[in-house]
Amino acid sequence: MPFAEKHAPNTLNQVAGNGDAIAKLMKFGAEAHKGSPPRPLLIYGPSGTGKTAAAHALAYSNGFETIELNASDYRDSATLEATLIPASRSAGLFTRKLLIILDEIDERSDKFDAGAESVINRLVKESRHPIIFIANDYWDRKITFLRDVVDRLEFKRLNRTEILNVLKTVLHKEGKELDEKMLEELASRSNGDIRGALNDLELMVGGLPELMENIGMRDRKLEVYGVLDRILLTKNFDSPRNAYMNTDLDGDMLMNWIDENIPNRYTWKSDIMNAYSHLAKASFFLGQASRKSYYGYLRYSSVLMSSGVSLSANGQIAYVKNYAFPSNIRQLSKTKSGRRALAGTVTKLVYALHAHKKDIFNGYLQLFKQMIKEAEKQYGEKEAVGYFARTYGLEEDDVKAIVASG
Ligand SMILES: Nc1ncnc2c1ncn2[C@@H]1O[C@H](COP(=O)(O)OP(=O)(O)OP(=O)(O)O)[C@@H](O)[C@H]1O
Ligand SMILES: [Mg+2]
């Protein structure tokens, strides 16, 4: 079970953040015990802020059974009527109180038919049991009809400290450890989303396949920083590999990022050397895969550049905050035409110099430009250009493009 579900709060006191809203929910719970149900609540706010968790914690701490509708029940008014109305009248099994929870009402109301609204209005009027609606957007036009009959209760994004505390509690319960700085980084990046933060945490301590599916379902893509974190900070096999598998990022592109950032994170020379050696092998297989159109090689390149680089780290890691943008891409994107003009030239130079494109862009081109210019001064343009073209397997136009480059 994913961390987020496994560590769901049982009581309202355990729900993180949103203190005012939680206090109101406690009051709502107390009133619901007294007799006629209080005015229904519409809990609203951003995803992952604990709305669903809080509604269930409310039920649990008050000993309420819950009635919920699953997605398909929301479709037509007949089904709504058949499930909700009798439930709202029932006394509840073992005479316990019921809490009716209509979660994600804004999304589900897309599927409402003409009669659905009036069934819900009737439910609100006639129910003997307390009702909680949950939505993301209070102002969603599809739920305008609710606004007159509910009290609104906003859930806000959690602050960094609140998220950090949840992460620490869960980590402790799991009996795992993680560097404090890394926890802080996760908390800052969560943007107040508890569920997201817990998913990230789980990935960090060795992601489960189950979780990957879960995240896939929520259509949440791990961005390049997330993948880099898992590769360069975890010293782990599974976590970086899973992160890599779960991303849409292009292999070449990611390799550029890793390439650029290994020396920013790793502090031991031997670690840096090992990491680059894995990256070089990954690069080899990536190249083979496209050259031979045998994509089975991608298996090796992916594991080498993720887990391989990650396991290269033995020593201390520097938790610098910002990742450096790959310099070769930065270089390439400066001028598009310059890039197009030089791309072919650089590829030819790769063979002549046995050097990486990146190094050619960053160093050799400048050097060549100097050399050619010097030679032009001494021997004249025609001689110089011809000489460089012959020596390095280039066309004369290539040599001229180098001289003209910025
Ligand atoms: N102390 C805690 N407080 C709140 N939630 C917690 C806590 N510990 C773990 N969680 C988990 O964090 C997640 C919070 O997300 P929840 O599903 O409640 O968000 P939501 O506001 O309903 O989001 P959505 O709008 O996407 O449905 C839950 O999976 C919950 O179990
Ligand atoms: Mg929810």
Image (cartoon, rainbow, N blue to C red):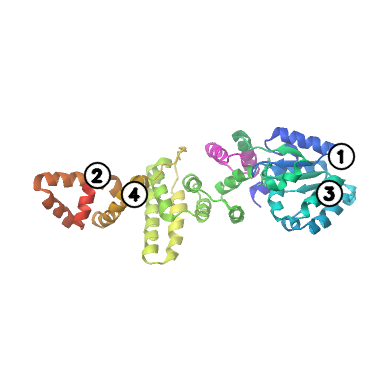
**Is 369 covered by the magenta stretch?**
no
Q: Amino acid at mark 4?
A: Lys
Main secondary structure found in the magenta portion: helix
- Residue 282 appears at what percent x and percent y? 40, 56
Tell me if 63 is positioned left or right of 210 in this view: right
Tell me the residue at 59%/52% (across/down): 215
| Residue 127 visible within the image | no
Q: Amino acid at mark 2?
A: Gln
**Is 192 covered by the magenta stretch?**
yes
Tell me the residue at 51%/46% (across/down): 226
Q: Nearer the viewer, mark 4 or mark 2?
A: 4
Q: CA distance from mark 1 to mark 2?
A: 79 Å
Tell me the residue at 28%/49% (across/down): 360
Q: Nearer the viewer, mark 4 or mark 3?
A: 3
Q: Which residue is mark 4?
A: 336
Q: Residue 156 lies in what quarter of the image? A: top right
Q: Which residue is mark 3?
A: 122
Nearest the eye: 5 or 149: 149
395 w.r.t. 198: above or below: below
- Residue 203 appears at what percent x and percent y? 56, 49
Region of the chain picked out in magenta, as a range: 166-193
Tell me if 214 is positioned left or right of 288 in this view: right
Q: Which residue is mark 2?
A: 366
User: Around disc 2, counting alpha carbons within 10 Å, would you say few (fewer than 14), some (14 to 19), or many (20 or more)?
Assistant: some
Q: Nearer the viewer, mark 3 or mark 2?
A: 3
Q: CA distance from mark 4 to mark 3?
A: 63 Å
Disc 2 is placed on an element classified as helix
User: Looking at the rendered structure, which numbered label has been put on residue 33?
Assistant: 1
| 4 and 3 marks in contact (CB < 8 Å) | no
Tell me if 45 is positioned left or right of 389 in this view: right
